[in-house]
Amino acid sequence: MTLPSALASFAVVAGLLTLIPGLDTALVLRSAAARGRAHGFATALGINTGALCWGAAAACGATAVLTVSQEAYLGLRIAGAAYLLWLGVGMLRAAGRPEAALGGPVGDGSAQAAAPLSHSYRRGLTTNLLNPKIGVFYTAMLPQFIPPHASHLAMGLLLALVHDVEGMAWFSLLILGTTRLRAALRHLRLRRDAVRRALDAVTGVTLIGFGVELALSER
């Protein structure tokens, strides 16, 4: 397998995976809808940074531990599930509070907009790093697309970067579409506080569902 053919083949597989709605999509949509375009891109960048880390770890063989050690996989799975449940419960609690209780006037979204971009970036990064299924995916897939005599670390990072580019392109479409929807809601004079609370409720339930699924899954 040559380098161009390896990149092209992996791009097809990674592209199909990117288009499947999942936890990453839910986080990016929520950030973009509730906090704006910049926070949506910050969350997406955090997710993609996590993917690069998993790609490097898989290329170096570190994530192989997850496939052979039940204890390592279980520990990361419990940590990831607990984090998702914590995020989900926090969003459900926020959904029950008006904007004024979050530190800003009702309806203006100032408390959401004032949150630092680094917060959204860390949320995307942490969520990705604590998902052992990402590590298992890279461990299973990356070796198949590394040409003979190629540097495993360099190739792993390159393949993960291909996945990141596809992911960022998809996230960009979602973010731009979501911000247009926010503008339409403002034009219809819908209360931003009500929209924010609905988004938090839906995303909170989604994250709790992913957390429970991760906690109960074997692999």
Image: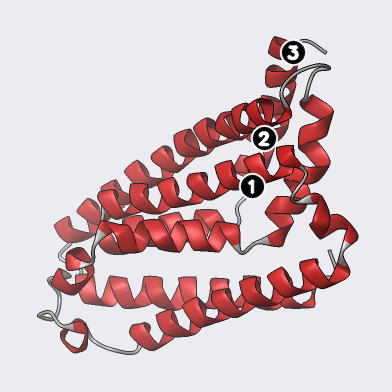
Which mark, by number, is residue 54? 1
Q: Which quadrant, please, contains the N terminus?
A: top right
Q: Residue 127's image quarter? A: bottom right
Mark 2 in CB contact with mark 3 (< 8 angstroms) = no
Farthest right residue?
A: 68
- Mark closest to the chain's N terminus, 2 or 3: 3
SS at mark 2?
helix
Q: Which mark is residue 5?
A: 3
Between 57 and 116, the one lying in front of the other is 57
The answer for how far apart the CA atoms under marks 2 and 3 are is 14 Å
Placement of 31 over or under 151, stated as above or below = below
Q: Is residue 127 left or right of residue 150?
A: left
Q: From the image, state whether disc 2 or disc 3 is nearer to you.
A: 3
Labels 1 and 3: the sequence-earlier one = 3
Q: What SS does tag 1 mark?
A: helix
* Residue reaching furthest to the left: 105
**Where residue 87 appears, x then y in whole percent?**
48, 77
* Residue 98 percent location from the top left of the image: 23, 86
> Do the residues under discs 1 and 3 have CB atoms within 8 angstroms?
no
- Of residue 189 and residue 5, the one placed in the foreground of this image is 5
Q: Amino acid at mark 3?
A: Ser
Q: CA distance from mark 2 to mark 1?
A: 14 Å
| Distance from the alpha carbon under mark 1 to that under mark 3 | 22 Å
Q: Which residue is mark 2?
A: 14
Tell which circle, 2 or 1, labels the residue nearer the N-terminal end.
Answer: 2
Q: Which numbered circle lies on residue 66?
A: none
Residue 40: x %, y % from top left: 35, 52
**Looking at the image, which residue is at 77% across and 10% down?**
2
What amino acid is found at the position of numbered circle 2 in the picture?
Ala
**Residue for point 68% across, 78% down:** 212
Looking at numbered disc 1 in the image, what kind of residue is underneath it? Trp
56 sits to left or right of 39: right
